[in-house]
Amino acid sequence: MKKLDQSGRFLSQLVFQNISGLLALGFLRILFAPSGWFPHEGVYQIVDFIVLYFIPIQFANTGGKMIGGQRGGVIASFVMVGLVAGNTTSYSMILPSMCVGPIIGYLIKKTDQWLERRTPPGYELLIYNGAAGLVGTLTAVVCYLYVGPLFARTMQMIYQEALLLAQSQLLPLISVIIEPSKLFFFNNVINHGILEPLGIQETKVNHKSIFFLLESNPGPGFGLLLAFYLKSKGQELAERRNLKSSMFIQLFGGIHELYFPYALMKPLVILPLIVAGAAGNFIFYMFESGLVATPSPGSIIVLLVLAPLGEHVGIIVGFAISVAVSFIGCMFVLSVRGAQVNKQSANKPIVVSELSVYKQHEVVRPMKKVAFACDAGMASSAMGAALFKKKLREKNIKSEVVNCSVDRVPVDADIVVAHSHLIERARQVCPGAEFYPLVTFLDDALYERIMERIVETDEYGEEDVFPFAGGRCIITTGHVIMEGTAQTKWQAIDELGELLYRLGHISPGYIEEMKEREFTNATYLGNQVAIPHGISADSSNIRSSGLVVGRYPDGIDFGKGEIAHLVFALAIRGSDQLSVLSQLAYLIEDKHKIWQLLHSTSRDEVADIINRIVLYIPGGEKT
Amino acid sequence: MRSMVKVRFKHGLHTRPAAHFTEIAQRFASEVKVEYKDFVAEGKSIIDLLKLNAAEGSILFIYIEGNDAREAMSALLEFMASDQF
């Protein structure tokens, strides 16, 4: 299930990054299609090329790049061109491209990893590019000869089934699946991962597609919010204001996420939502409505803009019916069950496990960067960030505010704001931050609290030395790998280097430096401990001094038969390196401490043992 | 025998120079001690040498006793004077 969730999210992100191109395609259709505003046969020809070539190649490129970096993207495009050229059917290779891209990216990534240890320094560029080129040529040929025809046949089947579904009377019932999944924030996955590629294909034949309407219809959600609003009389003013703005932002801004939390508070409203979705779909089906591109964001305005000439009535009626059904149904549910929004369950307390680690060391740093995270990092988080920025301006508080997808929270974020169900994922990316889970991005009270936190920590001055924070603790629980997976010392350096990188201490080049250092001179110190580090403490690849530690129960051979069970990876800048090394030496010498480090059961304990001995003072003791 | 030597390595007596030092010291049978700021380190233990925290420019005393003390001392002094690191 988790794998499915991950790959779904991956696909939706892949498409999401290309939304501008897909919208441009939609506009071309609206304007120049035979049934459009200004029919123009010549210009309209472009559409065919875009669907057949541009979109599959662009998708493959994005998918390749997301996994295999720039080279992955290039080779994925390359292979995709081969597939497109060999495609003898009239079906666009969009669905295959969403699977070819990531696969090629993965191949390139694996090749790079395989080569990494076998490449003599100085030949990287030549060997990596040469190998990627070879992989590209081989896969292009294989894909052209064998995979392409297979894809063509599979696609033919999928599209035919999908088209049959689109024409069958069962289509409206698809909301039984769509509406509940939306509530669990699968909306992007469903819309961009599944419905959109089908829609693009159908549009090629019918010049419009109903698939674009199924998930994006804002009607059911709007009806629900309206019902909640009318039923919220007598509640706090802030809550009502909140509902009111949610309502309009959902309708015109197209951010559907706003109604999910309300629906989750009263799970019974799922029934009216499903019926409303089905009713809307039924109207669309009766009117044979369709759009020319996916409306993203799903705002009523975008829906109308993307409707071909003469289709607007059907869309408006369908929308209105779904609003009405959802509104009446939700009113009914709320009258029976009461509309009191349960504040307690809505505002869960802050998850402070990580926070308390800092408190323990009495470390406070200025909160300079606030990251708003949501699933795709484009819609609701952008809105939250904008709202929060406005509030900061009003209060004249200075802080950097960014929005991002939850898997790409910047490592230097001090505060992370996200939906409570996404917090855990954000924590894995950026363990050093403070986390503020919320239920809706319109939560004024929470924003006030964050602003208080920023003001309160501001006095800790400009000196930003995280994670040493005030020269006290050198590592946090996020700097500890309890059970490393590496088998060889090179893998261990990779593993720990990656952690250093994720925590913002180094740029990737430092990992190579560590390996080179290891190569010239093994870093095994004694007492089952090795301390890989770079060649020079003046390396520009050290961004901020840091130290991570990994435990390897099976032991790692560090050369000459020396087996390390505890590996520290160091990235300490300048003359501070010596004092950290020296203190580390005291720790390593102490057999009892090492035994404790190897046998303690919690990250906190490991971090604590190290922090008690290794005191880092930025700037070093000058003697 | 005893000798005074200045640490010339940039960033002090860090892992690599310390490793070299112990490597050289281990070649000889004599006992090697290094003193810095009231602390005496075993010259054949890298961990001990790192504990000295001897920064660039600090003055160390090297004590060597044994049959090959003279050879050991000259090898170590040569190393400490080198521009390797």
Image (cartoon, coloured by chain):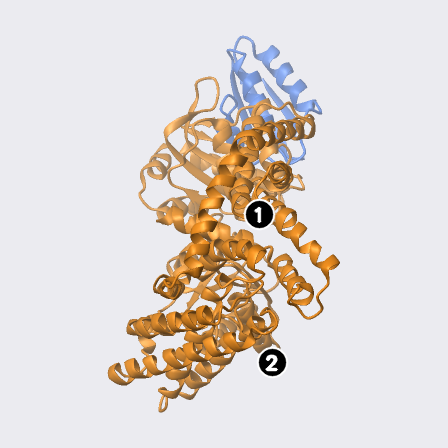
Chain colours: A orange, B blue
- Position above or below: B36 against A415: above
Q: Measuring 56% from the left and 67% from the top, which residue is drawn there?
A: A382
- The answer to which of A28 and A42 lies nearer the viewer is A42
Can the viewer see residue A46?
A: yes
The kind of residue tagged 2 is: Glu
Circle 2 sits on which residue? A394
Q: Measuring 49% from the left and 36% from the top, which residue is drawn there?
A: A150
* Relative to A578, A549 lies left or right: left
Label 2 SS: helix
Output the chain of dot 2: A
Q: Earlier in the sequence, mark 2 or mark 1?
A: 1
Disc 2 with disc 1 on a shared chain: yes
Circle 1 sits on which residue? A92
What is the x, y in percent for residue A156? 48, 45
* Quadrant (top left/top right/bottom left/bottom right) for the C terminus of chain A: top right
User: Are the two marked residues, 2 and 1, in contact with CB atoms closer than 8 angstroms?
Assistant: no
* Mark identifier at residue A313: none
- The answer to which of A580 and A295 lies nearer the viewer is A295
Q: Residue furthest bottom?
A: A234
Output the chain of dot 1: A
Q: Measuring 62% from the left and 45% from the top, which residue is drawn there?
A: A57
Instruction: Give how far apart the Cα atoms at labels 2 and 1 are.
Output: 51 Å
Q: Residue furthest right?
A: A42
* Relative to A521, A603 lies left or right: left
Can the viewer see residue A430?
A: no
Label 1 SS: loop
> In this rendering, which labeled residue sits more in front, label 2 or label 1?
1
* Relative to A593, B82 lies left or right: right
- Position above or below: A146 against A613: above
The kind of residue tagged 1 is: Ser
What is the x, y in percent for residue A520? 60, 23
